[in-house]
Image: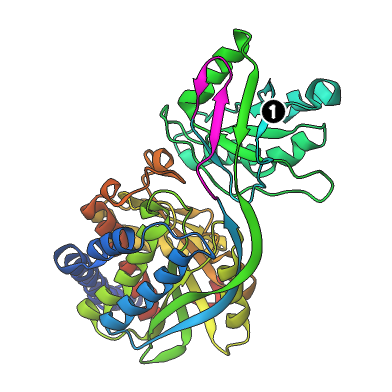
């Protein structure tokens, strides 16, 4: 019996060792290809400088679509095409004006989807609240005819900054409708960031059907502090003028390119980021970085490993920022395509140094992917655990697709998120490439071996 057991162990050792050595060498080859011959950084330079910011429905978004298609075609992917999608169209208009009366001008940005003020603006007293509980306690008597100022702080105690973001962002998302229920004329929302600076952070907001629509702006953290001090000193009057418009939906596109699998072409691995950005800055970290990393995945895998066994498809999604129409359009098409989407990997957390990836998947799937640690640890990748995949790929979850989200170091991301400051010069070439190489290595491994049916 001992001989049988020893023989079995020897057979397994001999069989597994070459595969492990091969995988390790392939990971090394992919990292080397990206770090020595990578195209993603120059692609990002072009996207940021030749196209710039690209809000859904804007002329710049249309230019970005044509840019993405041209880059993929030049890269020589097996096929490149555009997938139609209808998107909302919101226009900021001319620069917002905001002033603490008796103190001076302050920096604000209209939130995406906000209506305009009257042409001559709104002049009203500001009511300071820390949270929705305090808003409710004040009630209509204290809020009617005034401007509500939400001063929710970004909690510095959370090491993962997206946790603090999640706690604050609801004031941006629904703060206007909550205040409007009590008769507020407009809302000011402290920018969702730990940074103390002069850059207001825009972002999507939503109006509820059971409340009037009122204008909503983000105020920079420096000016949020100034406004708080001014209110305490008795300077409560505030002037706000914004010019934004909500227009009819317009047609746009997801941009798609793929390497067709040699052995299992019907099994598809999606990798992507969102091509749209807000209408300030250059959308470098959010999410130009994710787009160019995703294209780099296809380029580097073919250069380092040859044609993949399974189809690898890069999708540059349109309209993540204010509707996720591109993500839903792709998932709807995937459901009737006759293909099987076994995994989707999204990069939408900035182009910083990668730390690992989160998985929206079963415990068995997470355990299966843990075996990658031994090959990824030499590259500083250690975080493989349950979590969120990504907004664009989330609609694929209903098709039993395993969802992965790249997790870069998050400490600086919220300094740039949705601001004028999100520009190409804020992205480090090596960090961006390391993220692309990490994604490419994981995707190559899944393409090579597939995913066992029992773990999905």
Q: Is residue 108 above or below residue 202?
A: above
- The residue closer to the viewer here, 211 or 344, is 211
Q: Quadrant of the N terminus?
A: bottom left
Residue 102 in sight in this render: yes
Mark 1 element type: strand
Q: Kindly identify which residue carries mark 1.
A: 148
Horizontally, residue 102 falls left or right of residue 37, namely right
Residue under the image location 38 percent in, 38 percent down: 411
Res. 1 in view: no
| Residue 64 picture quarter | bottom left
363 drawn magenta: no
Check the image and report above or below for 369 versus 8. Answer: above
The reply, left or right, for residue 210 in relation to residue 118 is right
Q: Position of residue 283 (x, y in %)?
A: 40, 54
Tell me the residue at 29%/74% (across/down). 16
Q: Residue furthest front?
A: 120
Camera-nearest residue between 405 and 368: 405
Residue in the image at 58% along x and 41% along y: 166
Q: Quarter holding the C terminus?
A: bottom right
Of 22 and 3, nearer the camera is 22
Q: Residue 68 occupies which quadrant of the picture?
A: bottom left
Within-10-Å neighbours for mark 1: few <14, some 14–19, many 20+: many
Q: Position of residue 341 (x, y in %)?
A: 52, 79
Asked whether 286 or 15 is in front, the reply is 286
- The boundaries of the magenta stretch are 93-106
Left or right of residue 188, residue 347 in this image? left
> Is residue 101 shown in magenta?
yes
Q: Residue furthest top?
A: 233
């Amino acid at each position: 019996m001992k001989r049988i057991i020893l023989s079995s162990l020897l057979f397994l050792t001999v069989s597994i060792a070459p595969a492990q050595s091969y995988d390790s060498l392939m990971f090394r080859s992919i990292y080397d290809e990206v770090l020595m011959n990578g195209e993603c950084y120059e692609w990002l330079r072009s996207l940021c400088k030749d196209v710039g910011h690209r809000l859904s429905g804007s002329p710049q978004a249309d230019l970005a679509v044509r840019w993405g298609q041209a880059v993929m075609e030049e890269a020589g992917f097996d096929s490149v095409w555009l997938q139609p999608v209808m998107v909302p169209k919101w226009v900021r208009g001319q620069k917002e004006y905001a002033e603490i009366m008796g103190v001076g001008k302050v920096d604000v940005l209209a939130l995406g989807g906000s209506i305009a003020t009257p042409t001559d603006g709104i002049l009203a007293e500001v009511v300071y609240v820390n949270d929705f509980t305090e808003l409710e306690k004040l009630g209509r008597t204290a809020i009617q005819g005034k401007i509500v100022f939400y001063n929710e702080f970004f909690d510095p105690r959370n090491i993962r900054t997206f946790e603090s973001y999640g706690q604050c962002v609801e004031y941006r998302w629904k703060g206007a409708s909550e205040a409007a229920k009590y008769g507020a004329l407009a809302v000011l929302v402290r920018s969702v960031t730990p940074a103390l600076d002069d850059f207001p952070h825009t972002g999507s907001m939503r109006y509820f059907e059971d409340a009037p629509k009122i204008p909503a702006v983000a105020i920079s953290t420096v000016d949020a502090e100034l406004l708080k001090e001014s209110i305490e000193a008795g300077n409560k009057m505030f002037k706000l003028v914004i010019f934004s418009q909500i227009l009819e939906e317009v047609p746009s596109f997801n941009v798609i390119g793929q390497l067709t699998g040699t052995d299992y072409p019907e099994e598809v691995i999606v990798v992507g980021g969102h091509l749209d950005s807000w209408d300030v800055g250059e959308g470098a970290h959010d999410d130009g970085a994710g787009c160019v990393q995703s294209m780099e995945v296809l380029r580097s895998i073919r250069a380092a490993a040859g044609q993949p066994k399974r189809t690898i498809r890069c999708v540059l999604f349109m309209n993540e920022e204010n509707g996720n129409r591109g993500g839903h359009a792709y998932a709807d098409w995937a459901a009737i395509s006759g293909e099987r989407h076994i995994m989707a990997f999204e990069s939408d957390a900035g182009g910083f140094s990668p730390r690992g990836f989160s998985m929206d998947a079963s415990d068995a799937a997470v355990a299966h992917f843990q075996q990658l640690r031994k090959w990824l640890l030499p590259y500083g990748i250690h975080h493989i655990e349950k979590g969120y995949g990504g907004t664009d790929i989330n609609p694929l979850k209903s098709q039993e697709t395993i969802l992965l989200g790249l997790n870069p170091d998050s400490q600086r991301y919220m300094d740039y998120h949705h601001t004028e400051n999100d520009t190409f010069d804020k992205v480090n070439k090596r960090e961006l490439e390391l993220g692309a190489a990490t994604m490419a290595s994981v995707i190559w491994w899944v393409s090579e071996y597939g995913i066992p049916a029992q773990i999905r």
